[in-house]
Image: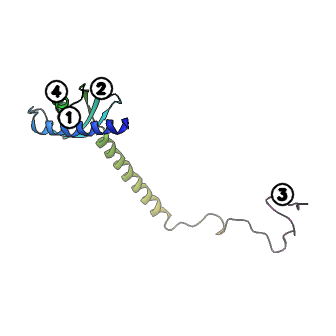
Amino acid sequence: MAGARVERVADQIKQIVALLIDRKVKDPRLGMVTVTDVRVTGDLQHASIFYTVMGSEEERIQSGKALESAKGMIRSSVGKQLGLRLTPTIEFILDALPDSAKTMEELLAEARARDEEIRRRAEGAKPVGDADPYRKPKASEAPVPGADSATGGGSAV
């Protein structure tokens, strides 16, 4: 029950902050910011707001500074719109997910290239040993009746 309320409050904060960044924050340092996630503590006292910025590293830094300078106005608006007894403190955290996803995509592309290289090398390859590497009993070796290879060859009495 309490978890559902925390999730609801986090979702409301996400929507409020996204609208505020889009319509109220007029800082020229602010780039193309997207609120990706909001995590609220169980007691609703603190909210961590994750965001991404389209652009260069410098634009990310400048947007972070703009969000920090607008933090008071954003927190005040969040408090008014939420209607909670206590307004949660907020912090802005640059979301590392896009960078992680890009790195993961690069690693997957490298793995695909290596797999293709291995497949290309294996095209004309022949096995080193026999075509069938498993030992089979010779025709002269008849299986012993009652012998069970799993139990060591003895019969159960």
Toward the right, the furthest residue is 157
Residue assigned mark 3 = 152
The disc labelled 1 sits on which kind of residue?
A: Arg
How far apart are the two marked residues, 4 and 2, measured between alpha carbons?
A: 14 Å
Q: Which quadrant of the view contains residue 155? A: bottom right
The residue under label 1 is 60
> Given the image, on which type of amino acid does mark 3 rest?
Gly
| Sequence-first disc among 1 and 2 | 2
Nearer-the-camera pick, 100 or 50: 50
Is 130 on the left or on the right of 98, as rendered?
right
**Numbered mark located on residue 17 in the image:** none
Look at label 4 and name its amino acid: Ser
Q: Residues within 10 Å of mark 3 (few under 14, many from 20)?
A: few
* Image mark for residue 76: 4
Q: Is residue 102 above or below residue 27?
A: below
| Among the two numbered marks 4 and 1 on one chain, the one whose residue lies closer to the N terminus | 1
